[in-house]
């Protein structure tokens, strides 16, 4: 049995969840679909600042969900391909591209199958906000990224910081994922997760919408920074930039406060923490 076959249950559980939440996310104000269709660039400030000039470049957006960021990148002039394992997400992405009048290709498939599903190789690979925590094998992911890039191609990765992922606001004796705004922020999840899923159960999605879902369970994976960076190095990529940030794209814990820039931070008077990180890595 291959390592990825060993995690088939996690893929199946997560795919059912993501298929169900697509329509909720498309309709959610949190995703800014209507402002995007009105012509706004809805990328968040970190990636909007760091991605640079992508005009004329070929770009693959891995784990693209329903393609909103993919299409923002198309509007910036990139030739884009989005990959996601959810058929509902891919259908929504194609519909959104048609509504926006933008050229984009969207492919359905598991991240680990990308090199066989897509023959093209790219100038840029783009991975952001809540992507790698759904993957059981981070070093396998790094190998896929390297295979999808042309020589001198570059990865842009922007993610929740694994240090932050290990913390939570859970009352004493509380169940996993049951957060309490009054509870202290404490180490909760194993930083060195060793590919073991953290199982969450929630009948609503992270956008805060009240719509109840039937597929309540998800499997997530915490990857230490050493595995993320080490995996990229082992895959033959060279780190060209690395930044840590005191903000994140969603309310990871109840105590975080949303700013005017749609980013969440520790409240005033609290010690700031690394909530996210970004990097670029180039193929030889």
Image (cartoon, rainbow, N blue to C red):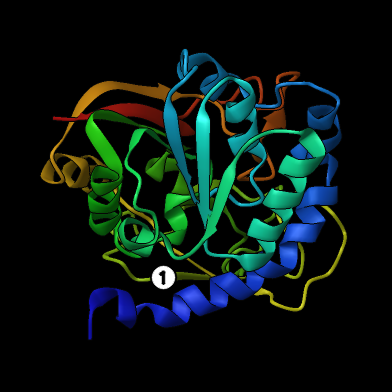
Vertical side of 77 occupied by 221: above or below: below
Mark 1 lies on residue? 197
Vertical side of 189 occupied by 167: above or below: above
**Could you classify mark 1 by the number of other residues whose Cα lies within 10 Å: few (under 14), some (14-19), or many (20 or more)?**
some
From this viewpoint, is residue 166 visible? no
In this view of the protein, which residue sits in the foreground, 123 or 192?
Answer: 123
Residue 150: horizontal and vertical position, in percent?
Answer: 25, 35
In this view of the protein, which residue sits in the foreground, 171 or 5?
Answer: 5
In this view of the protein, which residue sits in the foreground, 63 or 278?
Answer: 63
In this view of the protein, which residue sits in the foreground, 57 or 11?
Answer: 57
**Which of the 4 quarters of the picture holds residue 97?**
top right
From this viewpoint, is residue 178 visible? yes
| Left or right side of 11 for 195 | left
Residue 196: horizontal and vertical position, in percent?
Answer: 34, 71
Look at the numbered disc 1 and give the secondary structure of its residue.
Answer: loop
Q: Residue at x 87, y 59 (%)?
A: 210
Residue 189: horizontal and vertical position, in percent?
Answer: 42, 59
Q: Quadrant of the N terminus?
A: bottom left
Vertical side of 225 occupied by 73: above or below: above
Q: Residue at x 83, y 47 (%)?
A: 28
Residue 204: horizontal and vertical position, in percent?
Answer: 77, 63
Q: Quadrant of the C terminus?
A: top left
Q: Residue at x 84, y 54 (%)?
A: 209
């Amino acid at each position: 049995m291959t390592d990825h076959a060993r995690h088939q249950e996690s893929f199946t559980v997560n795919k059912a969840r993501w298929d169900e939440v697509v329509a909720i996310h498309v309709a959610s104000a949190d995703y800014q679909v209507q402002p995007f269709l009105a012509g706004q660039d809805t990328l968040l400030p970190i990636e909007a600042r760091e991605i640079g000039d992508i005009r004329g470049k070929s770009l693959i957006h891995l784990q693209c969900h329903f393609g909103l960021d993919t299409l923002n990148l198309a509007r910036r002039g990139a030739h884009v391909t989005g990959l996601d394992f959810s058929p509902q997400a891919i259908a929504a992405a194609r519909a959104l591209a048609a509504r926006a009048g933008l050229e984009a290709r969207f492919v359905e498939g598991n991240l680990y199958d990308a090199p066989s599903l897509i023959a093209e190789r790219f100038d840029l690979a783009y991975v952001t906000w809540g992507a790698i925590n759904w993957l059981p094998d981070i070093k396998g992911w790094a190998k896929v990224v390297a295979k999808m890039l042309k020589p001198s191609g570059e990865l842009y990765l922007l993610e929740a910081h694994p240090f932050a992922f290990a913390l939570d606001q859970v009352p004493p004796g509380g169940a996993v994922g049951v957060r309490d705004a009054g509870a202290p922020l404490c180490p909760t999840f194993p930083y060195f997760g060793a590919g073991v899923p953290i199982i969450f159960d929630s009948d609503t999605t992270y956008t805060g919408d009240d719509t109840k879902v039937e597929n309540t369970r998800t499997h997530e994976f915490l990857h230490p920074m050493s595995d993320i960076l080490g995996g990229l190095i082992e895959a033959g990529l060279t780190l060209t930039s690395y930044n840590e940030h005191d903000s994140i794209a969603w309310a990871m814990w109840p105590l975080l406060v949303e700013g005017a820039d749609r980013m969440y931070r520790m409240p005033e008077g609290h010690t700031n923490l690394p909530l996210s990180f970004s990097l670029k890595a180039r193929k030889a």
